[in-house]
Structures are given as structure tokens and as C-alpha cells.
Image: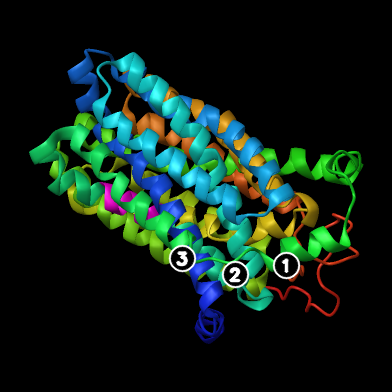
Amino acid sequence: MLTTVREQARGLTKDQRNAFLAAYLGWTMDAFDYFLVVLVYSEIADDFHVSLTDMAFLTTVTLVMRPVGAFVFGLWADKRGRRTPLMVDVMFYSVVGFACAFAPNYTILLLLRLLYGVGMGGEWGLGAALAMEKIPVAKRGFWSGVLQSGYSFGYLIAALAFLFIEPHFGWRGMFAFSLVPALVALYVRTKVGESEAWERTVRLNDTPVREIFKDPKVLRRFGYLVLLMTAFNLMSHGTQDVYPTFIKKGLGMTPDTAIVIAIVYNIGAMIGGPLMGGYSERFGRRRVIVVAAVIGLPIVPLFAYSTSAGWLALGSFLMQMCVQGAWGVIPAHLNELSPDKIRGFYPGVTYQLGNLIAALNLPLQEWLATRYSYPTALMVTIIPTLLLVVLLTAVGKEARGQRFGRADDTATGAPEPGTAPEPAM
């Protein structure tokens, strides 16, 4: 099996590598800025004299506005190509993220986070579409996992920035630093060519977008994917967002301890994504997701009820291997289930609508922690979410092996003729 994963990792062209790197850096930037807030929102709350529950809505408004960005930039990308909308998007969220460093009060910061959500709403869908359209069909699983691990890498960079920048420059310095990785992502994106799959689709398929959405199969799948992405976002945010605060406020450990543990569990996440993504190329997308989520269930007590730094690090490392292992399949899975004509729009909007529904996760966990305890808040939210991921994944379909930009694309998600059937695990 590891040989198969290694084979998937090899043999990309320069343009394919640049496209992937651009998507990876964009997704890294998304997580970097999002988790800046998660890591310092107790410090911001102290500066602006607001409650932690109110501060949690900084993440909520960002998530709420992401569907708007996915909708606007997605439609633009399906009409004009992936490259230009992505570069405009990076420039927009770079400026807004940098401006957060100078917010004079909570209200202005809330407004800036709202605008930032619009920019980040366009990033994942367009970046993932461009990367998956350029990656060879047989290599999608592994590179899907590596792409998704960019989110964990962004969290890791945010944790390191907290260790080395926050003590000297405070939370404002961390937001100012966010401009650096954003500009790197923009530079790499200028080196990427347009998606050949999009160009083929424009030549071969002139069906208006409104006609595509009249297809009941497209609408049913759209609704299903929104539900699936809701479960996935509850799973990831439920195991990540409140955890540093749990360690600091709930267990009374130092901020540095919380950050070291965050670094450890993000390493686990960066292992899980590529590994499970690579396995999904052999065993199937849905089976790997289900296995990863099921393995996560018995880890929840260790994850939620440990009280020493060592056990917390181990529990969170294993949990994120499972959670982000399941997530590693998603970039390939969503893009394969999307009609060619609306691939810029379809994965991003379904993903971000799921984010929207899951946006109350952090305030809910903070409320439960205040009323009961942090371990209780983690247990009662994570276990049902993992079960929901298993159920929704099991009843769905997949299109592993789908070739993008085909003249006969009917939006049914049928695999490429000759694709091998999924073997039993």
C-alpha cells in the first residue's frame, strides 16, 4: 500500500507542481489567519473588554461570509477561468488580513473579519479545482491529501508565530505578519497556467449554468454535499477551535504548553491527510473516510479527558490523524462529484455552506464548557459528529477516476470507463 502512495507522489510537471503549490499556499494562508484568531482571541477579549463568547463570533462571522465569496468567485472562475479570480482573491484577503492588525475596537475587527470571510470563501474551491484539474487522474488521492494538509500546516505556522511573534509584538503583530505568506502565495500563483480542463469544458460544453441546475441529479447532489460538508466542518472545528482554550483556561496550563500541543497535533494531521488520501486511490474515497472517522471514536475520551500534557499531546495527535485523514480525501472527492461546467462554483459553495451551518460550533462549545466543562463540551459535540460523518459518507456516492473536461459530462459523477472497481478493505 505504501508503494502505491509513493507512486502517486511522483511525476508531476512544472506547471502541475506550481498549480498545486499555489493552491497549497492559499489554503495554508486560510488556516494561518483563521487560527490566529483562535489562538489569541482570549488576549483580544482582554484588550477590547468583551467576553470569550462574544469573541468566538469573530470566527463565526468569517465562516458565515465564506459562502458569499465562494459564490462570487466561483461563478467568475467558471466563466473566465481559474487564474485571474484566484489572484484577485489573494490580493483582497491579504489587504483585509493586514488591516486587522490596526483595528481600534471590537466592532471594526468584527467587520474586517466579515470581509476576510468573503475573500477566504473563494480560496478553497477555486484553488482545489485548479489543482485537482491539473493533477493526473491516478495521482489525485495522494495530492488531495497533501493539499488538505496545507490547512494543518497553516495552523502550525500560526502556532509558531504565537510562540515567537506574539510575546514581542502582541496579537496585532501576528496579523501584520500574515501579509508575508499571502504575498508568497500570490507570487507563486502568477507562475501558474490556466486550467486545461476548464478550457476544454468551454469549447465542448455551452450549456448555460441555469440549465445545469435544472437537472434534479445536480440539485440533489448539491444538497447532499452541503450536509456532508456540514458534518466535516463540525468534525474539524469541533476538534480544533476550542482545544487551545481548553488547555489554557480549562486545565490551567501555560499558553506555551497549549501551543506545543497544537504543534504536535498538527503534525499528526499532516501525516493523516496524505496517507488516507493516497489510500483512497486504491480503496475508494468513501471507504477511507468511514474508516478514519470510525477509528476516531475510541480516541475521543483520551482526547477530551486527559489532564497531563503528554496524554493531551498523544490524544490530539491521534485524533487529528483521523480527522484530517478523512479530510484528505475531500478535495478529490468533491471535485470528482462536480459537473465540469460549474466546478469553480460547485465544490466551493457546498463546502462553504457546510461551514456556514457549522459556524456556531465554537460558541456552542464555549457555552457548554461554561455550563458544564470543557471535556463534556468536547464529548457531546465530537462523538455525534463522527457518527454523522460515517452515516452521510456511507449513503453517498463517489466518482473516483472521473476525467475532467469531457464532452459527455452529464454531472452524474460516473467514473472514467475502465476504472477498476473498489476492492474490499
Which structural element holds mark 3?
helix
* Residue 400, numbered label: 1
Classify 10 Å Cα crowding around label 1: few (below 14), some (14-19), many (20 and above): many
Q: Quadrant of the N terminus?
A: bottom right
Instruction: Pick whichever of labels 3 and 2 is earlier in the sequence.
Output: 3
Q: Nearer the viewer, residue 305 or 11?
A: 11
Whether residues under marks 1 and 2 lie with C-beta atoms below 8 angstroms apart, the answer is: yes
What residue appears at the point 54 percent right and 80 percent down from the top-left corner? 12
> Is 412 placed left or right of 423 in the picture?
right
Which image quadrant is residue 365 in?
Answer: top left
Query: Which range is magenta?
Result: 151-158
Name the residue carrying label 3. Answer: 21
Q: Is residue 109 visible?
A: yes
| Residue 341: x %, y % from top left | 79, 53
Closer to the observer: label 3 or label 2? 3
Name the residue carrying label 2. Answer: 141
> Is 109 placed left or right of 11 in the picture?
left
Q: Please, what is the three-letter code of the amino acid marked with disc 3?
A: Leu
| Residue 414: x %, y % from top left | 84, 63
What residue appears at the point 86 percent right and 76 percent down from the top-left corner? 417
